[in-house]
Image: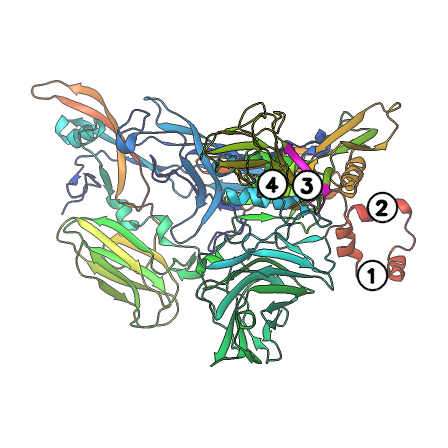
């Protein structure tokens, strides 16, 4: 549900319809009130059959608007303000009055405009504005990803979204020296993050943020580089829940969000006030100052606040008394431990207002762990997000307000409290359902692709070998691009092939050179070529070869074979497909369903969970409710979980809004919904029965048959 | 001054529409939609504004009486307004501005939502006519309920009269030229029932659609009755449709 602007009229039987405005910005015709308009959003593009498809995939909003022709009229050949050019941005919003705020309905691009000299209106077709996500993306290499932790698939979405300007946590502020978004991974955006102890590879969703769950003994540290000259005062800004200890240099600063206190070392806790920011309920900013007297570092003090303009708490001061040295006094690392949750951490040297920028994206954890998060070479950002959403059985879309949303499969399955109850008798024009056997399956197979990960420490993994000789002119430099199969990390340094003293043969990256193409001539010096290799993207290496001699050289060995070999310590390639199945055997299955999750799912446990869920959903035909006209509410959004009841048919179920369509004409607008009926989740059971003992349930349900208890459970609402 | 019922023309150049036949119709039309649920519950949506149409008739007249209307219909006279005297005597402020969505204020016995403090309403007024601006509120005596100014003149405070509870604060004035009246709602207490009308304070409140209003003229239909020298005498039927956003000059 969108939050309605202050002053928006309350729900009533007689509604004065709001003014719907299309704002074309600086392009003609500027902001205009609309006569007829429509906006539709629907989840599509899933890997699943129709009856369960609607609950996953992605949505691309579309719409059309028509507005009165201006005087003089707008046209494609008009002059100045009368020239109508497609392709510009168009924000559509509803408004009631100058005193009432705007309710966003979508941000679009004008794709096609049409009109006629005799027509008093101009029509414009709108498509969702995804220009920022269209460009090709490249995600920095595997740094710190490999190993047992992996990344949640939502990290890739976050990385792609950040390149397009969608931020779930604020982008690095101007004075930021360390940034740790913690959106599905522990990879730092600025600075270097390290996990210590035995971290739990789990991610949970709190208020649309993905937080890591530090284990009891684990800690996460972020190393930062102090600016020159060094600063004694630093700002740590992060979304925090629970109790976290941030070790800043030598002193532990404890943030307790329940008690709302900040405490430095053994100092007295200082209380701060919550609610300083309306867009970041969990965000806290801590200022730490190292105080020195002469050559002695005497104390570290910390204070906190919850908004860019909120009042600071008092100082909590820890006494230190140690000599001033770079290591002692100047903070170069922040370590986080404790039982709380954290994300969007930035360490900055100033309290920039950008540290409080409103989020333009929001994600759930996907529940899918990637050991080798590699992007297809030719993919656009939006394509990647779509593929990830489909393969993780989640949903991705751009909301009315223009924020990017990814909902994990838990949410799409109904793990949440319904935003509202839609009672058919009082809110729906009809309840149209359909059910068919076509989409039911008696066998489900899920195919996934675990990566082929190899790790060594002696630079012995060969990742690329030249197939052609490179001619390097005397004193010249040649650049060669090498496309690798898979991803590599930690490239070996370069040595001539004949040097087996610095490193044994078969290890480190190697080059050879000869003064003739066929390998003849005397062996050049060890420094004849200077070779460097840098990663440019996840799977492309740029090799730069400089000839330091006064003779032309060829990169061939003594027998004329091209010799340029890149070796590395880590390689990750797409592995073999693995298929797991549920239901009837392959031979006896009458209606099998095959789902290919590709390389977006890489672990057996994730694939098994997906298989279990799909299998539970497709064994029997399931009903869908499509295109029901509902008493409209502009606050309703795609992906909302609602409760729908119908007294006549006994329907009482949680449902996910999988499609939402708005059409308006003067004085009225209609809203129709596509609904996916959701199963009862453990969340619902917990909400209803969580506080009861078995004895109480036994008393409550005394005398009921199993069928009656089943009905009871099926009709509970969270 | 003899009132003819209607004045017409561009702001600042309005002229009376003389010799209009009795029986002019003024028809507002409000766009609406409705939804009836499976349970038979009806919901109604309606547009904020109800643009009006006036059908004006003349009998046995020479063309000079409709010259302005004809010029406007032909597009040579741009941006024409209609001043409906009867409507101006009710309330010249469109409903949209007369009440808001705030806490209800008892306006002549009717609970109307308060308008936000700072709300600005502009109304074109004509020279030589007496107007009264009024608003209802529970401001303490002497407190400013609203301010008003004529054209670029000085701002005048309209202060609450003695008494308690929701009561009307009025201010009367007679502009010397055609100009714009600007009313700004003050803070201090909830204000509702904004009204500007032609006449003296009358202690009541009436709703209005917004007068004068921008109109489009549909070409006068003529029935030639007598051709006897000069222009002859003709019956004319003219329709004027309200256009544009009420309250926006």
The reply to the same-chain question for discs 3 and 2 is yes
Question: Disc 4 versus disc 1: distance between alpha carbons?
Answer: 70 Å
Question: Disc 2 versus disc 4: distance between alpha carbons?
Answer: 72 Å
Of the pair A445 and A692, the residue shown nearer to us: A445
- Residue A692 image label: 1
The reply to the same-chain question for discs 4 and 3 is yes
Kindly indicate the quadrant of the structure image that contains residue A617: top right
- Residue A710 image label: 2
- Which of disc 2 and disc 3 is earlier in sequence? 3
Of the pair B150 and A75, the residue shown nearer to us: A75
Label 1 CA crowd tier, 10 Å (few <14, some 14–19, many 20+): few
Question: Disc 3 versus disc 1: distance between alpha carbons?
Answer: 64 Å
Residue shown at 64% from the left, 48% from the top: A364
- Residue A495 image label: 4
Q: In this view, does A444 lie to the left or right of A182?
A: right
Q: Callout 2: helix, strand or loop?
A: helix
- Which of disc 1 and disc 3 is earlier in sequence? 3
Residue shown at 27% from the left, 39% from the top: B214
Count of numbered circles on the image: 4
In front: label 4 or label 1: 4
In percent of width and height, residue A404 lies at 55, 44
In front: label 3 or label 2: 3
The reply to the same-chain question for discs 3 and 1 is yes
Q: Which chain carries label 2?
A: A
- Residue A507 image label: 3
In percent of width and height, residue B86 lies at 26, 45
- Which of disc 3 and disc 4 is earlier in sequence? 4
């Amino acid at each position: 549900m969108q939050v309605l602007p202050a002053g928006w009229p309350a729900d009533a039987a007689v509604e004065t319809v709001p003014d719907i405005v299309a704002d074309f910005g600086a392009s003609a015709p500027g902001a205009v009130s609309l006569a007829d308009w429509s906006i539709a959003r629907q989840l599509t593009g899933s890997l699943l059959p129709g009856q369960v498809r609607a609950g996953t995939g992605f949505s691309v909003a579309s719409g059309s608007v028509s507005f009165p022709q201006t005087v003089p009229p707008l046209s494609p050949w008009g002059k100045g303000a009368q020239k109508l050019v497609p392709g510009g941005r168009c924000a559509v919003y509803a408004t009631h009055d100058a005193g009432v705020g705007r309710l966003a309905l979508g941000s679009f691009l004008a794709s096609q405009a049409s009109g006629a000299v005799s027509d008093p209106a101009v029509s414009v077709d709108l498509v969702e504005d995804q220009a920022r996500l269209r460009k090709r993306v490249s995600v920095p290499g595997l740094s710190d990803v490999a190993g047992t932790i992996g990344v949640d698939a939502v990290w890739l979405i976050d990385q792609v979204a950040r390149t397009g300007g969608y931020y779930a946590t604020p982008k690095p502020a101007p004075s930021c020296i360390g940034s740790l978004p913690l959106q599905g991974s522990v990879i730092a955006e600025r600075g270097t993050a390290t996990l210590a102890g035995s971290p739990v590879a789990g991610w949970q969703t709190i208020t649309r943020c993905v937080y890591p769950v530090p284990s009891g003994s684990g800690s996460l540290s972020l190393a930062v580089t102090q600016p020159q000259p060094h600063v004694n005062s630093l700002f740590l800004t992060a979304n925090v829940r629970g109790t976290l200890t941030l070790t800043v240099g030598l002193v532990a600063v404890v943030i307790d969000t329940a008690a709302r206190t900040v405490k430095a070392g053994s100092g007295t806790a200082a209380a701060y006030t919550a609610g300083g920011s309306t867009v970041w309920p969990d965000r806290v900013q801590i200022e730490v100052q190292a105080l020195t007297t002469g050559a002695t570092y005497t104390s570290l003090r910390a204070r906190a606040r919850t908004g860019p303009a909120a009042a600071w708490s008092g100082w909590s001061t820890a006494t230190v008394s140690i000599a001033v040295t770079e290591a002692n006094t100047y903070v170069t690392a922040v370590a986080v431990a404790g039982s709380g949750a954290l994300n969007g951490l930035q360490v900055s040297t100033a309290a920039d207002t950008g540290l409080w920028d409103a989020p333009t994206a929001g994600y759930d954890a996907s529940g899918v762990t990637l050991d080798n998060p590699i992007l297809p070479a030719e993919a656009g950002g939006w394509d990647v997000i779509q593929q990830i959403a489909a393969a993780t059985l989640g949903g991705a879309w751009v909301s009315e307000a223009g924020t990017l949303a990814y909902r994990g499969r838990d949410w799409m399955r109904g793990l949440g409290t319904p935003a509202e109850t839609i009672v058919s008798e009082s809110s729906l024009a009809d309840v149209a359902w359909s059910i068919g056997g076509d989409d039911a399956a008696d066998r489900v197979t899920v195919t996934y692709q675990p990566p082929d990960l190899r790790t060594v420490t002696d630079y012995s993994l060969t990742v690329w070998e030249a197939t052609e000789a490179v001619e390097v002119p005397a004193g010249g430099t040649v650049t060669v691009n090498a496309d690798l199969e898979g991803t590599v990390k930690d490239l070996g340094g370069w040595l001539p092939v004949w040097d087996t003293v610095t490193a044994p043969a078969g290890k480190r990256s190697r080059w050879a050179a000869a003064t003739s193409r066929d390998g003849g001539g005397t062996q050049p010096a060890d420094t004849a070529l200077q070779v460097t290799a840098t990663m440019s993207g996840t799977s492309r290496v740029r090799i730069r070869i400089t000839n330091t001699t006064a003779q032309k050289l060829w990169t061939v060995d003594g027998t004329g074979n091209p010799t340029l070999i890149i070796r590395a310590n880590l390689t990750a390639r797409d592995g073999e497909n693995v298929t797991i199945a549920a239901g009837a055997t392959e031979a006896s299955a009458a209606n099998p369903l095959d789902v290919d999750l590709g390389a977006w799912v890489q672990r057996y446990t994730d694939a098994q969970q997906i298989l279990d869920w799909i299998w539970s959903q497709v064994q029997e035909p399931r009903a869908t409710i499509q295109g029901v006209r509902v008493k409209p509410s502009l606050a309703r959004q795609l992906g909302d979980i609602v409760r729908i009841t119908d007294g006549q048919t006994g329907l009482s179920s949680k449902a996910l809004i999988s499609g939402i369509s708005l059409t308006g004409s003067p004085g009225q607008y209609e809203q129709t919904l596509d609904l996916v009926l959701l199963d009862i989740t453990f969340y619902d059971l917990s909400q209803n029965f969580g506080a009861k003992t078995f004895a109480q349930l036994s008393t409550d349900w005394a005398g009921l048959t199993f069928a009656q208890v089943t009905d009871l459970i099926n009709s509970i609402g969270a | 001054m003899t009132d003819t019922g209607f004045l017409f023309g561009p702001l600042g150049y309005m002229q009376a529409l003389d010799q209009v036949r009795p029986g002019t119709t003024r028809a507002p039309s409000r766009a609406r939609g409705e939804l009836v649920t499976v349970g038979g519950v009806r919901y109604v949506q309606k547009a904020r504004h109800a643009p009006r149409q006036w059908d004006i008739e003349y009998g046995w007249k020479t063309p000079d009486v409709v010259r302005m209307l004809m010029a406007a219909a032909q597009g040579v006279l741009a941006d024409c307004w209609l001043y409906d005297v009867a409507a101006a005597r009710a309330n010249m402020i469109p409903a949209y501005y007369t009440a808001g969505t705030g806490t209800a204020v008892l306006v002549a016995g009717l609970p109307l939502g308060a308008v936000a403090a700072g709300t600005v309403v502009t109304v074109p007024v004509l020279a030589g006519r007496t107007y009264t601006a009024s608003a209802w509120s529970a401001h303490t005596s002497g407190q400013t309920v609203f301010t008003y100014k004529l054209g670029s003149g000085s701002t005048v405070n309209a202060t609450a009269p003695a008494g308690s509870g929701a009561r009307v604060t009025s201010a009367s004035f007679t502009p010397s030229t055609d100009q714009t009246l600007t009313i700004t709602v003050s803070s201090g207490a909830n204000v509702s029932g904004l009204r500007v009308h032609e006449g003296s304070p009358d202690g009541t409140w009436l709703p209005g659609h917004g007068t004068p209003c921008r109109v489009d003229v549909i070409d006068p239909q003529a029935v030639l009755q007598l051709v006897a020298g000069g222009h002859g005498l003709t019956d004319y039927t003219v329709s004027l449709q309200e256009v544009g956003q009420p309250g926006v000059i």
